Amino acid sequence: MLRRTLYGLLLAAPLLPGGLACGDNNENGCEPLSPRTAGPIELEADGSLPWNPSCEPCPKHPEGGVGLGCSAQRVPFGGAVLICEYATCINDGRRPEGLKEAAVLDPGSELGALFAKAAWLEAASVPAFLRLAEELQAHGAPEVLVKAARRSAGDEVRHTRAMQALAHRHGATMPEVDLPPFEPRSLEEMLRENAVEGCVRETFGAFVAGWQGRTARDPEVRSTLRAITRDEVRHAELAWAVDAWAQERLSKVQRERLHQARRDALRTLGEEVEGHQPPEVLVDEAGLPSREQARTLFQGLSSLTA
């Protein structure tokens, strides 16, 4: 069902308008960064703020974010400045518990920042899948699920290298992954992370990666994302297989809490899809979907989780 939904959505790729599928929440892979100030800028002839100022004076963000837009704001003693908004955008990978945010110290460009942060999240997904494999084994899951989690960790190593190559090509370097030691947790806690990060976030990430692999103008990005998509679809299928295996091992109350966590994650993701504003270079060169296209991908995800 997941593959059929994905392939049906990708068939529509050339028919839908352009833009970026990037939310404003770190679980989705897009995180708002602190705004920066630029200017001063001139007021209109009548003394009012410019309603549609140029964002060209906005500086690069020191944490390697991409520009989302800007607005004019008055300052004390007259005059105005630009308030520049940024976000970091990542669309793939399973974010492990306790992962500490990292900045791209030398982003090079918006594309460089995007790929460097994507490589960082792919690298963080390696220990996440190794932990999942250990926990599945400890809880008596079928060996096929344990092996699939270990294989997924290996996939993420390859994804990290592929995204690092794209980042280096655009003058950026992947930040270090800072992850504290994992603590033991219950079956329900493991499954809640799987529901949020796997059934919702990683499944949507597979849809977005597939979209990029079809629509990116840059042929190297298309080729890289097509290969990654094949793995990410399997990772999403693993999340749903783990979820199905665990159902009979949970009480009715635990199952409802798990379903509610998935519904909450889906609702949050839907809000994020509605709240972004893309830079065109990421749309054109990286193939990230527009808000309209992201809505279509999100509707496909919603049909799976209904």
Image (cartoon, helix red, strand yellow):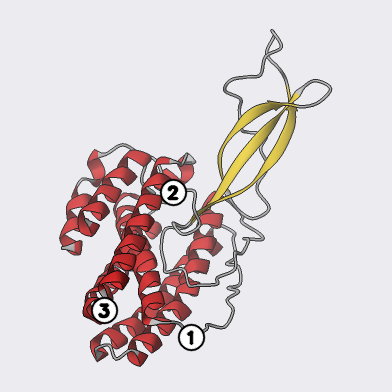
148 or 25, which lies in front?
A: 25
Residue 59, x across and y down, in percent: 68, 42
Task: Residue at 34% x, 91% y: name it.
Answer: 137
Q: Is residue 202 above or below residue 151?
A: above
* SS label for mark 2: loop
Provide the residue designation for mark 3: 246
Q: In which quarter of the image is the N terminus?
A: bottom left
Does label 2 or label 3 sit earlier along the sequence?
2
Viewer can see residue 282: yes
Q: What residue type is labelled 3?
A: Ala
Q: What residue type is labelled 2?
A: Cys
Q: In which quarter of the image is the C terminus?
A: bottom left
Real-space CA distance between mark 1 and mark 2, rounded to the nearest whole angstrom: 33 Å
The image quadrant of residue 239 is bottom left
Task: Residue at 28% x, 78% y: name it.
Answer: 250
* SS label for mark 1: loop
Disc 2 vs disc 3: Cβ atoms closer than 8 Å?
no
Real-space CA distance between mark 1 and mark 3, rounded to the nearest whole angstrom: 18 Å
Q: In this view, does 13 lie above or below 232?
A: above
Residue 28, x across and y down, in percent: 44, 56
Provide the residue designation for mark 1: 184
Viewer can see residue 154: no
- From the image, state whether disc 1 or disc 2 is nearer to you: 1
Provide the residue designation for mark 2: 22
Q: In this view, does 275 lie to the left or right of 13?
A: right
Does label 1 or label 2 sit earlier along the sequence?
2
Residue 185, x across and y down, in percent: 45, 82
Does label 1 or label 3 sit earlier along the sequence?
1
Toward the top, the furthest residue is 46
Q: Which amino acid does label 1 sit on?
A: Pro
178 or 58, which lies in front?
A: 178
